[in-house]
Image: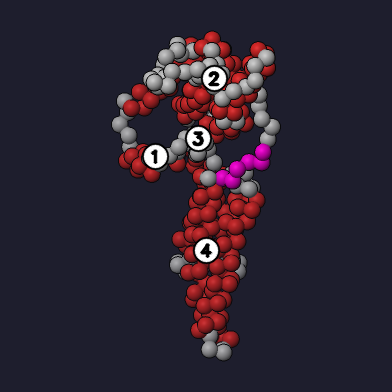
Amino acid sequence: MIERADQLVLEFVSKVADAAHGRMRPEQRLDFVRRVRERVDEERAGSEDAKAVARILARFGTPEQLVDREARRLAGQSGEPPQTRVFPVDDAEPPRRRSTPTPPGVMHYRQEARRHLADRGGRKPSAFSRIRDAAMAGGNPMATDGRDAWSIFANNRRETVGLGLFVFAALLVPFRLPTVAIFPVSGLIWAVGAVVVLASEGWVFGDRLIGLSAPVAAYLFGGGALALVRFQGDLARFLVEFHGVSGVMFIIGTAAGVTWLIYRLFDPPPPPPSRTLRVTR
């Protein structure tokens, strides 16, 4: 997903240039945008992973914060107090986005991104691609770390395998397969999926625990509660009823746990705060 990573960088640099309009002289604005792009490329270190690039950009802060810091630095050099607008702009006519020359680096990556998009547009999309594009339509690349549904699963293969094992185990519950020793086949497959999920790094531990505990809790507590309602004081009847409803409750719990894990894979919790990167001269 090279074009996704480049698109994130281009959008960020363009927002920085827009935020700097009216706050700096044209030559200062061009120099500042150039230094921002150089610092982004330095932190990026050639990475084409859109998720990693989005995290790097988030560590810089918002474009407005970058411009505010640079405006304070420039004001400190000139001895003037920082202001909201250091250089006046004619409010009668809104500024055009390309009123100043586009830096060569920005233009180069824009052309690269357009070429990648043109190459993709020349191929006839598959049915799955059309479904995927429809599902992700309107998505903000910054909100999803520059990834669509396919790239999220492709870049988290271990997590995808664990989710697939959970779903496969739940689908086998209605079938009366022979047991392995004393363990049902669906239970063994679910246990393998649990090990894979616990070893995955795509979720925090709390999310993994919720995904694993949902089917277990539904099986034990949900199945037990329904069996208690219908057992009529007979222990043998309770066991029969529990055996009859616990499988359905396990399927429901697995569906809930898989749904939660997929949600957290698409929308992980925010990372802990880290130091803010500064653009140095």
Mark 2 and mark 3 lie on one chain; the one further toward the N terminus is 2
How busy is the neighbourhood of tag 2: few (under 14 within 10 Å), some, or many (20 plus)?
many
* Residue occupying the point 53% across, 16% down: 87
Secondary structure under badge 1? loop
Q: Main secondary structure of the magenta part?
A: loop
Residue extending farthest bottom: 233
How busy is the neighbourhood of tag 4: few (under 14 within 10 Å), some, or many (20 plus)?
many
Q: Closer to the observer: label 2 or label 3?
A: 2
Q: Is residue 185 above or below residue 153?
A: below
* Residue occupying the point 46% across, 61% down: 171
Q: CA distance from mark 2 to mark 1?
A: 32 Å
Q: Residue 78 lies in what quarter of the image?
A: top right
Mark 3 and mark 4 lie on one chain; the one further toward the N terminus is 3
Secondary structure under badge 4? helix
Q: Which residue is mark 2?
A: 23
Q: Which residue is mark 1?
A: 138
Q: Is residue 261 above or below residue 90?
A: below
Q: Closer to the observer: label 3 or label 4?
A: 3
Q: Closer to the observer: label 2 or label 4?
A: 2
Residue 76 pos. (x, y %): 68, 17
How did the renderer colour the structure? secondary structure
* Residue occupying the point 56% across, 25% down: 84
